Amino acid sequence: MKARPSFFIILLTILFSSFAFSQEAPKDKPQYGWHNELVAGLNLTQTSFDNWSKGGDNTLAWQMNLNFKFVNNQEKFNWANSGGLSYGQTKIADEEMRKSVDEFKIESVLTYKIGIYINPFVAVTGETQTLSGWDYGKSPKEKISAFMDPGYFRESFGVGYEPNTTVKTRLGFAMKQTVTDEFPARYTGDAEEKIKNEIGAESVTDVSWKINEGSLLISKLELFSNVKAFDEIDVNWDNVLTAKVSKYVNMNFNVKLIYDKDISKKRQLKQALALGLTYSFL
């Protein structure tokens, strides 16, 4: 099958963007040793009505976010470990409490330094959820997901490009596993296949842009293409804009786009705006 040029166009766009950032901000002088970061946030929204003439439903919504980063930067190598957990629930009127967000992801990247900007790497990523997910559009409600059902894992190696502390991108050979137990037809496309293995190419681009003293944009674009269908690209693009309102109050705006033909022929899109408390432990 002749591959369409879309995968290469996206890669060229990423490389061009990286080059543009590198021209704007030179790479900082490296600091060696462990650099740790652990940030937790909690958002809560509540509305209650009693004899309210204009009408309305009582609502309660909460979301917890936990993000960590442990990086060991040395003269000859860099070992970066990062991940996050997001979980939230919503209750409207007399309905039961329902899950609104549930994501757990970890990533470990080991880079061996042989040059200034371009270096080889090996990486492992894993992604799943913590509790069961339900389809409330059916009566009775139907269970459609659970912990490690599905679970996604990728192992990759290749070369990475890091022109500065704002942007870094990597490209390489990758293996991807989709793990499921109760729902193989939904997540692997085959009712008898509980572990789906794929081999292909992977591109991951991270942007951490400090817009000003109180605003930070974090963007992660992950692309994976199976060698058997190189013109079909799995996309996972997560964007979080954080703006500090006060010392402990932050505004978070999150937009996440997912495309995986094995799950849905249409793109999936999630948007969330939250105002709440945040605290950094490290």
Image (cartoon, rainbow, N blue to C red):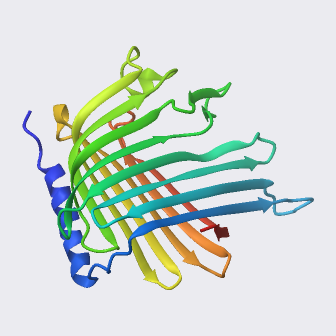
Say if residue 267 shows up in the picture.
Answer: no
Q: Nearer the viewer, residue 255 or 114?
A: 114
Name the image quarter holding the N terminus. top left
**Is 144 placed above or below 31 here?**
above
Q: Residue furthest top?
A: 192
Does residue 105 lie above or below 263 as drawn? Answer: below
In the rendering, at what x and y percent does residue 258 appear? Answer: 39, 47
Q: Position of residue 174 (x, y in %)?
A: 25, 40
State the count of labels: 0
Image point (38%, 59%), residue name: 220
**Front-lying residue, 273 or 243:** 243
Residue 20 shows in the view: yes
Q: In the displayed orientation, state which residue is furthest to the right.
A: 51
Q: Give percent across and percent down for residue 202.
A: 25, 47
Q: Residue at x 39, y 34 (%)?
A: 263
Please report the residue visible at 39 percent of the width from the left and 75 percent of the height from the top. 209
Q: Farthest residue toward the left?
A: 2
Q: Tell me: 251 left or right of 11.
A: right
Q: Nearer the viewer, residue 80 or 182?
A: 80
Screen quadrant of the C terminus: bottom right
Q: Nearer the viewer, residue 94 or 46?
A: 46
Write the residue at 43% across / 78% down: 210
Q: Quadrant of residue 221?
A: bottom left
Where residue 184 sits in the image (x, y, percent)?
A: 44, 22
